[in-house]
Image (spheres, rainbow, N blue to C red):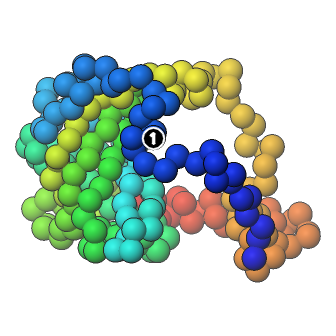
């Protein structure tokens, strides 16, 4: 088993009252900005977003977060309390979907390229196969197998500090992908072992790209 760094117990935060002593009071507007519905500004943000992360928990409380991406506006705003997220082909681990079946609480974080603000939505999710809902979400003639319907409990726009600190959208901060091994090389190193032959590795990388093209939708 890999070694784990032990934290000094005298510096651990034990409860919320202890936590609050390290911070000033929450700004009043940070509390008031939380809505229980999708208003016109939240709708406009979501309709521009091509990417979100969805956080779930298993029945035992194990946490998970998964990315979801599609053309901008892929998340449907059915009404001011309901969002619909298509489930596209993936690796079939089904972590997010399985978690929702045992613990429906979800957290969504929407990003829009070029925007430093993010949109947070918390609520309860269910899975639907309703063909009337899935058909309008088809891409390249392929409707999703199912969709995640989120009943909205809380909505608020998040300030720009995190993305500005990270310079996420700054072209000057783009990193060369070849500074790390390819995805296929990483996965093989972590599982069965990657071939030493660069030509064989190139073929595997090309096969993965072909799989992306074939099975994106």
Instruction: Give how far across and how far down residue 67 sits, in percent.
Output: 45, 52
Instruction: Give how far across and how far down residue 98 sits, in percent.
Output: 34, 74
Q: Estimate how packed mark 1 is, as few (under 14), some (14 to 19) or many (20 or more) residues with alpha carbons within 10 Å.
A: few
Q: Is residue 68 visible?
A: no
> Relative to residue 91, is residue 152 drawn left or right?
left
Q: Is residue 183 visible?
A: yes
Q: Residue at x 33, y 25 (%)?
A: 26
Out of 141 and 193, give the one closest to the viewer: 193
Does 27 sit above or below residue 78? above
> Relative to residue 126, is residue 92 drawn left or right?
right
Q: Quadrant of residue 105?
A: bottom left
Q: Quadrant of residue 185?
A: bottom right
Q: Residue at x 45, y 56 (%)?
A: 65
Instruction: Give how far across and how far down residue 211 sits, in percent.
Output: 57, 66
Residue that carries the numbered disc 1 in the rendered image: 18
Q: Residue at x 21, y 32 (%)?
A: 34
Q: Residue at x 17, y 46 (%)?
A: 153
Q: Quadrant of the N terminus?
A: bottom right
Instruction: Give how far across and how far down residue 92 sits, in percent.
Output: 45, 74
Q: Quadrant of the C terminus?
A: bottom left
Out of 68 and 32, give the one closest to the viewer: 32
Does 25 sit above or below residue 200? above
Task: Count the marks.
Answer: 1
Out of 21 and 149, give the one closest to the viewer: 21
Does 148 sit above or below residue 171? below
Q: Quadrant of residue 157?
A: top left
> Relative to residue 99, is residue 198 drawn left or right?
right
Q: Residue furthest front?
A: 10
**Element carrying mark 1:** helix
Out of 63 and 66, give the one closest to the viewer: 63
């Amino acid at each position: 088993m890999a070694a784990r760094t032990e934290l000094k117990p005298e510096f651990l935060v034990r409860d919320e009252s202890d936590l609050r002593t390290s911070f000033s009071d929450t700004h009043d507007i940070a509390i008031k900005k939380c809505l229980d519905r999708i208003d016109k500004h939240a709708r406009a943000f979501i309709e521009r977003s091509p990417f979100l992360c969805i956080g779930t928990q298993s029945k035992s409380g194990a946490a998970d977060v998964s990315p979801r991406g599609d053309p901008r506006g892929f998340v449907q705003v059915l009404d001011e309390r309901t969002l619909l997220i298509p489930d596209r082909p993936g690796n079939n681990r089904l972590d997010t979907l399985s978690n929702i079946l045992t613990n429906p609480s979800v957290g969504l974080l929407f990003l829009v390229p070029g925007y430093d603000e993010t949109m947070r939505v918390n609520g309860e999710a269910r899975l639907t196969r309703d063909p009337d809902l899935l058909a309008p979400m088809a891409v390249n003639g392929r409707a999703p197998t199912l969709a995640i319907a989120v009943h909205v409990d809380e909505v608020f726009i998040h300030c720009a500090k995190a993305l500005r600190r990270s310079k996420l959208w700054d072209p000057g901060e783009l990193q060369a992908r070849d500074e790390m091994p390819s995805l296929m090389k990483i996965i093989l190193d972590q599982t069965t072992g990657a071939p030493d032959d660069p030509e064989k590795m190139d073929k595997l990388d090309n096969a993965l790209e072909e799989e992306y093209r074939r099975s994106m939708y």
